[in-house]
Amino acid sequence: MESVAGTVTCAAQRRASRPRADALRNRERIVTAAREMFVEFGPDVPLDEVARRAGVGNATLYRNFPDRAALVHEVVLAVTSRTTDRLEEAVAAESDPFAALSRFVHAAADERIGALCPMLSGGFDRDHPELLTERRRLEEAVEGLVERAMSAGRLRTDIAVGDVLVALSQLTRPLPGIACLEIDRFTHRHLQLFLDGLQSPARSELPGSAATLEDLRGGR
Protein backbone atom coordinates (compact mmCIF):
# COMPACT_ATOMS: atom_id res chain seq x y z
CA MET A 1 0.00 0.00 0.00
CA GLU A 2 2.84 2.38 0.84
CA SER A 3 4.37 1.79 -2.60
CA VAL A 4 1.06 2.48 -4.35
CA ALA A 5 0.46 5.58 -2.25
CA GLY A 6 3.96 6.83 -3.01
CA THR A 7 3.44 6.32 -6.73
CA VAL A 8 0.13 8.21 -6.63
CA THR A 9 1.72 11.04 -4.66
CA CYS A 10 4.63 11.34 -7.12
CA ALA A 11 2.26 11.37 -10.08
CA ALA A 12 0.16 14.07 -8.46
CA GLN A 13 3.25 16.14 -7.77
CA ARG A 14 4.37 15.82 -11.41
CA ARG A 15 0.94 16.92 -12.64
CA ALA A 16 0.99 19.87 -10.24
CA SER A 17 4.45 20.93 -11.38
CA ARG A 18 3.51 20.91 -15.10
CA PRO A 19 1.61 23.98 -16.32
CA ARG A 20 -1.81 23.14 -17.69
CA ALA A 21 -2.33 23.43 -21.44
CA ASP A 22 -4.74 26.36 -21.01
CA ALA A 23 -2.23 28.14 -18.74
CA LEU A 24 0.47 27.75 -21.40
CA ARG A 25 -1.90 29.08 -24.06
CA ASN A 26 -2.69 32.09 -21.91
CA ARG A 27 1.01 32.79 -21.42
CA GLU A 28 1.64 32.54 -25.17
CA ARG A 29 -1.30 34.86 -25.89
CA ILE A 30 0.06 37.43 -23.44
CA VAL A 31 3.55 37.34 -24.99
CA THR A 32 2.11 37.63 -28.51
CA ALA A 33 -0.13 40.54 -27.54
CA ALA A 34 2.72 42.29 -25.73
CA ARG A 35 4.99 41.89 -28.75
CA GLU A 36 2.35 43.42 -31.04
CA MET A 37 1.62 46.32 -28.71
CA PHE A 38 5.28 47.06 -27.96
CA VAL A 39 5.76 47.36 -31.72
CA GLU A 40 2.77 49.66 -32.13
CA PHE A 41 3.10 51.84 -29.04
CA GLY A 42 6.51 51.18 -27.46
CA PRO A 43 7.40 49.17 -24.33
CA ASP A 44 5.55 51.54 -21.96
CA VAL A 45 2.09 50.53 -23.17
CA PRO A 46 -0.30 49.95 -20.21
CA LEU A 47 -0.27 46.31 -19.17
CA ASP A 48 -4.04 46.19 -18.78
CA GLU A 49 -4.24 46.98 -22.51
CA VAL A 50 -1.93 44.04 -23.17
CA ALA A 51 -4.20 41.80 -21.09
CA ARG A 52 -7.25 43.06 -22.99
CA ARG A 53 -5.70 42.30 -26.38
CA ALA A 54 -4.58 38.87 -25.16
CA GLY A 55 -8.12 38.12 -24.03
CA VAL A 56 -7.15 37.43 -20.44
CA GLY A 57 -7.77 39.17 -17.14
CA ASN A 58 -5.24 41.37 -15.39
CA ALA A 59 -4.86 38.71 -12.69
CA THR A 60 -3.81 36.15 -15.30
CA LEU A 61 -1.24 38.53 -16.78
CA TYR A 62 0.30 39.33 -13.39
CA ARG A 63 0.26 35.68 -12.37
CA ASN A 64 2.51 34.95 -15.34
CA PHE A 65 4.49 38.20 -15.32
CA PRO A 66 4.62 39.99 -11.96
CA ASP A 67 5.89 43.23 -13.49
CA ARG A 68 6.68 44.96 -16.79
CA ALA A 69 10.34 43.92 -16.65
CA ALA A 70 9.39 40.23 -16.56
CA LEU A 71 7.09 40.64 -19.56
CA VAL A 72 9.65 42.61 -21.57
CA HIS A 73 12.24 39.94 -20.77
CA GLU A 74 9.97 37.22 -22.12
CA VAL A 75 9.13 39.17 -25.28
CA VAL A 76 12.82 39.82 -26.05
CA LEU A 77 13.62 36.16 -25.39
CA ALA A 78 10.78 34.96 -27.63
CA VAL A 79 11.61 37.28 -30.54
CA THR A 80 15.32 36.42 -30.40
CA SER A 81 14.62 32.68 -30.32
CA ARG A 82 12.04 32.83 -33.13
CA THR A 83 14.42 34.90 -35.29
CA THR A 84 17.13 32.24 -34.96
CA ASP A 85 14.55 29.59 -35.85
CA ARG A 86 13.74 31.56 -39.03
CA LEU A 87 17.45 31.58 -39.95
CA GLU A 88 17.71 27.83 -39.51
CA GLU A 89 14.61 27.38 -41.67
CA ALA A 90 16.13 29.60 -44.37
CA VAL A 91 19.36 27.60 -44.38
CA ALA A 92 17.40 24.35 -44.68
CA ALA A 93 15.32 25.71 -47.57
CA GLU A 94 18.05 27.37 -49.67
CA SER A 95 21.20 25.73 -51.03
CA ASP A 96 22.66 29.12 -52.03
CA PRO A 97 23.96 30.81 -48.84
CA PHE A 98 23.16 34.31 -50.13
CA ALA A 99 19.61 33.24 -50.96
CA ALA A 100 19.39 31.86 -47.42
CA LEU A 101 20.69 35.16 -46.03
CA SER A 102 18.13 37.11 -48.06
CA ARG A 103 15.32 34.83 -46.93
CA PHE A 104 16.42 35.20 -43.32
CA VAL A 105 16.63 39.01 -43.47
CA HIS A 106 13.05 39.27 -44.74
CA ALA A 107 11.86 36.72 -42.17
CA ALA A 108 13.58 38.63 -39.36
CA ALA A 109 11.70 41.75 -40.44
CA ASP A 110 8.43 39.83 -40.11
CA GLU A 111 9.49 38.82 -36.60
CA ARG A 112 9.88 42.56 -35.80
CA ILE A 113 13.40 42.11 -34.49
CA GLY A 114 14.03 45.86 -34.75
CA ALA A 115 11.30 46.44 -32.18
CA LEU A 116 13.59 45.00 -29.52
CA CYS A 117 15.84 48.07 -29.50
CA PRO A 118 13.60 50.40 -27.44
CA MET A 119 13.12 47.62 -24.89
CA LEU A 120 16.83 47.23 -24.16
CA SER A 121 17.13 50.37 -22.09
CA GLY A 122 16.78 51.47 -18.50
CA GLY A 123 17.10 48.63 -16.04
CA PHE A 124 16.72 45.86 -18.62
CA ASP A 125 19.07 42.97 -17.79
CA ARG A 126 20.81 42.28 -21.10
CA ASP A 127 23.16 39.82 -19.45
CA HIS A 128 20.51 37.48 -18.08
CA PRO A 129 21.74 33.91 -18.74
CA GLU A 130 18.67 33.00 -20.83
CA LEU A 131 19.10 36.06 -23.03
CA LEU A 132 22.84 35.56 -23.39
CA THR A 133 22.23 31.99 -24.58
CA GLU A 134 19.67 33.03 -27.19
CA ARG A 135 21.70 36.04 -28.32
CA ARG A 136 24.80 33.91 -28.84
CA ARG A 137 22.74 31.33 -30.69
CA LEU A 138 21.51 34.04 -33.08
CA GLU A 139 24.91 35.69 -33.49
CA GLU A 140 26.67 32.40 -34.20
CA ALA A 141 24.02 31.39 -36.72
CA VAL A 142 24.23 34.71 -38.59
CA GLU A 143 28.02 34.65 -38.45
CA GLY A 144 28.13 31.17 -39.94
CA LEU A 145 25.76 32.13 -42.74
CA VAL A 146 27.72 35.30 -43.56
CA GLU A 147 30.97 33.31 -43.70
CA ARG A 148 29.43 30.72 -46.04
CA ALA A 149 28.05 33.41 -48.35
CA MET A 150 31.49 35.06 -48.51
CA SER A 151 33.24 31.76 -49.15
CA ALA A 152 30.83 31.11 -52.01
CA GLY A 153 31.74 34.47 -53.56
CA ARG A 154 28.18 35.73 -53.19
CA LEU A 155 28.75 38.32 -50.46
CA ARG A 156 31.07 41.32 -50.57
CA THR A 157 34.10 40.81 -48.35
CA ASP A 158 34.46 44.31 -46.89
CA ILE A 159 31.68 43.78 -44.36
CA ALA A 160 31.31 41.75 -41.15
CA VAL A 161 28.40 40.11 -39.37
CA GLY A 162 27.88 43.25 -37.27
CA ASP A 163 27.04 45.22 -40.43
CA VAL A 164 24.23 42.79 -41.18
CA LEU A 165 22.84 42.91 -37.64
CA VAL A 166 23.03 46.72 -37.39
CA ALA A 167 21.32 47.25 -40.74
CA LEU A 168 18.67 44.65 -39.91
CA SER A 169 17.95 46.37 -36.61
CA GLN A 170 17.74 49.83 -38.17
CA LEU A 171 15.69 48.88 -41.21
CA THR A 172 13.14 46.84 -39.26
CA ARG A 173 12.71 49.17 -36.30
CA PRO A 174 9.12 50.46 -36.29
CA LEU A 175 8.26 53.93 -35.08
CA PRO A 176 5.81 53.72 -32.15
CA GLY A 177 2.38 55.13 -32.80
CA ILE A 178 -0.51 54.12 -35.04
CA ALA A 179 0.20 56.87 -37.57
CA CYS A 180 3.67 55.43 -38.25
CA LEU A 181 2.54 51.92 -39.06
CA GLU A 182 2.00 52.85 -42.71
CA ILE A 183 5.77 52.79 -43.25
CA ASP A 184 5.74 49.03 -42.66
CA ARG A 185 4.72 48.49 -46.27
CA PHE A 186 8.13 49.81 -47.36
CA THR A 187 10.20 47.59 -45.06
CA HIS A 188 10.75 44.65 -47.40
CA ARG A 189 11.39 46.96 -50.35
CA HIS A 190 14.18 48.75 -48.48
CA LEU A 191 15.57 45.49 -47.13
CA GLN A 192 15.91 44.25 -50.70
CA LEU A 193 17.84 47.39 -51.63
CA PHE A 194 20.16 46.66 -48.71
CA LEU A 195 20.59 43.04 -49.79
CA ASP A 196 21.41 44.10 -53.35
CA GLY A 197 24.19 46.26 -51.89
CA LEU A 198 25.63 43.25 -50.04
CA GLN A 199 26.19 41.17 -53.15
CA SER A 200 29.59 40.55 -54.68
CA PRO A 201 31.20 42.10 -56.63
CA ALA A 202 30.97 45.27 -54.57
CA ARG A 203 29.87 48.33 -56.53
CA SER A 204 31.37 50.91 -54.18
CA GLU A 205 33.95 51.37 -51.45
CA LEU A 206 32.47 51.51 -47.99
CA PRO A 207 33.62 54.25 -45.60
CA GLY A 208 34.96 53.28 -42.18
CA SER A 209 35.57 49.73 -41.04
CA ALA A 210 33.40 46.64 -40.89
CA ALA A 211 31.25 46.23 -37.77
CA THR A 212 32.13 43.11 -35.80
CA LEU A 213 30.25 41.40 -33.00
CA GLU A 214 32.90 42.75 -30.61
CA ASP A 215 32.09 46.29 -31.79
CA LEU A 216 28.41 45.76 -31.06
CA ARG A 217 29.06 44.27 -27.61
CA GLY A 218 31.47 47.05 -26.73
CA GLY A 219 28.95 49.72 -27.65
CA ARG A 220 26.21 48.43 -25.37
Image (cartoon, grey):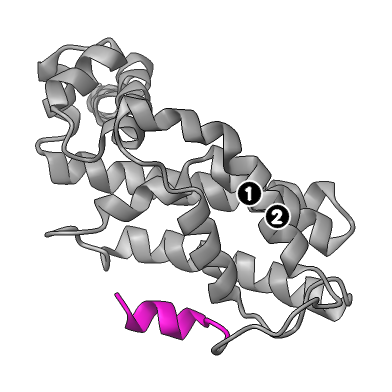
**Amino acid type, callout 1:** His
Place of residue 29 in the rendered image (x, y in percent of width and height, measured from the top left): 35, 21
Answer with the quarter of the image where residue 23 lies: top left
- Quarter of the image that includes the C terminus: bottom left
Local secondary structure at mark 1: helix
Please report the residue visible at 70 percent of the width from the left and 85 percent of the height from the top: 205
Residue underneath mark 2? 193
Query: Would residue 190 be visible to someone looking at this image?
Result: yes
**Amino acid type, callout 2:** Leu
Q: CA distance from mark 1 to mark 2?
A: 5 Å
Place of residue 72 in the rendered image (x, y in percent of width and height, measured from the top left): 24, 44
Residue underneath mark 1? 190
Please report the residue visible at 54 percent of the width from the left and 89 percent of the height from the top: 208
**Vertical position of residue 43 compared to residue 102: above or below:** above
Place of residue 125 in the rendered image (x, y in percent of width and height, measured from the top left): 20, 62
**Vertical position of residue 68 compared to residue 145: above or below:** above
Q: Which residues are magenta?
A: 210-220
Callout 2: 10 Å neighbours few (<14), some, many (20+)? Answer: few
Local secondary structure at mark 2: helix
Answer with the quarter of the image where residue 196 lies: bottom right
Q: Is residue 211 magenta?
A: yes
- Quarter of the image that includes the N terminus: top left
Please report the residue visible at 33 percent of the width from the left and 31 percent of the height from the top: 40
Number of marks present in the image shown: 2
